[in-house]
Amino acid sequence: MIKTIKVQDLAVGMYIMLPISWFKHPFLKNEFTIKSQDQIDKIIDHGITEIVIDTEKGDRSDAHPTGSPARVPPKTWSPEKLVPPELREAIHDQSLPPEKKSRLVYESSRVLVERLFEDPRTENIREAKKSISEIVDLIIADDATSRELLKITSYDFYTYTHSVNVGVFSVLLAKSVFKGSDAHNMHELGAGFFLHDIGKVRIDPAIINKRGKLTEEEMYNIKSHPYQGYKILKETNQLTEECMIIVMQHHERENGSGYPKMLKGDQIHTYGRICCIADVYDALTSDRSYQQKLNTFEALKLMKETLVSHFHQELFNKFVFLFTQ
Ligand SMILES: [Fe+2]
Ligand SMILES: [Fe+2]
């Protein structure tokens, strides 16, 4: 039966139909079965108040009242199922116009990152790396699609879209900085950029999703994600040491105010500096519950005027230049 309910009554297991256009919500499809409390939160965050559900399609066997913790068993992904087929299809379809291609690559990359973060075992990291390499090749070879990718800023600030955004921005900046030099393995670099926040899988989601001010202990916990990410990649042995530095250093700041090691200036690797600029830019231009998102101009202005001491100047100037082309 089709019926309309209040979003407060949504529960895991319900089959929903979103009332807004595909371009305006952060999900891959307009209709799907709710799998987690996180998805319900996203729907509420998008200002939706009522929603249509199909009770025949929705399996509510594991439904729970809204507000109580979602008890969804951890998801596992076999390496063969990890990469959405649309990702490869979109990358290799020469007939797709850049706008459509970039949108498909973006959405399917987000799904890939989401699955990887749900099950970050060695085989899956290896599989994800192959796809990230293809995305990197696309960004390097196809300027028209890259330009469109740059325009797709996410509608929200969830770890998966954020990972893809930071991956895309960082690869574009690295492409401009290294200009085809053989000294840098762009595939490895791309993997480091896309996976820079993988350590968040080891942080309690209640802390990551907390709306209010974090306690000192919670902050300490969050700030361990660069090290946790480094540990995951080290254990799975899937990235070179140089690219694992990206994960470890993406929150360090040029003036020494970052974490975890409060490194300064040249103590921070160029790869870490690139990721830091992309990370801050994406945080400023994405919707977060406690902050209105800025447009490109406002974000770059704030980074230049207020946060200037946080970034490597030459790299930052090159980053700004990406948006003026
Ligand atoms: Fe981070
Ligand atoms: Fe990040």
Image: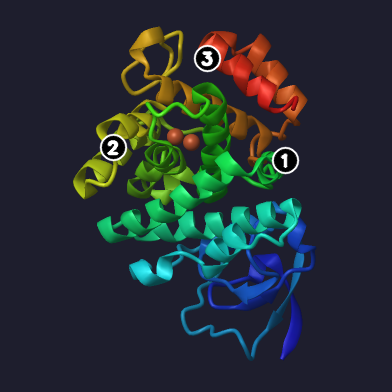
Q: Nearer the viewer, mark 1 or mark 2?
A: 1
Quadrant housing the C terminus: top right
Tag shown at residue 151:
1
Tag shown at residue 311:
3
Residue beneath label 2, please? 230
Please say whether residue 7 is visible from this viewpoint. Answer: yes
User: Horizontal and vertical percent for residue 203?
Assistant: 36, 45
- In the image, the residue with mark 2 has its CB under 8 Å from the nearest atom of ligand 1: no
Q: Earlier in the sequence, mark 1 or mark 2?
A: 1
Could you give the CA–CA distance between mark 1 and mark 3, rounded to whole angstroms? 22 Å
Q: Is residue 285 left or right of residue 64?
A: right
Residue type at mark 3 is Phe
User: Horizontal and vertical percent for residue 57?
Assistant: 62, 87
Please say whether residue 77 is visible from this viewpoint. Answer: no
Q: Residues within 10 Å of mark 1 (few under 14, many from 20)?
A: some
Q: Secondary structure at mark 2?
A: helix
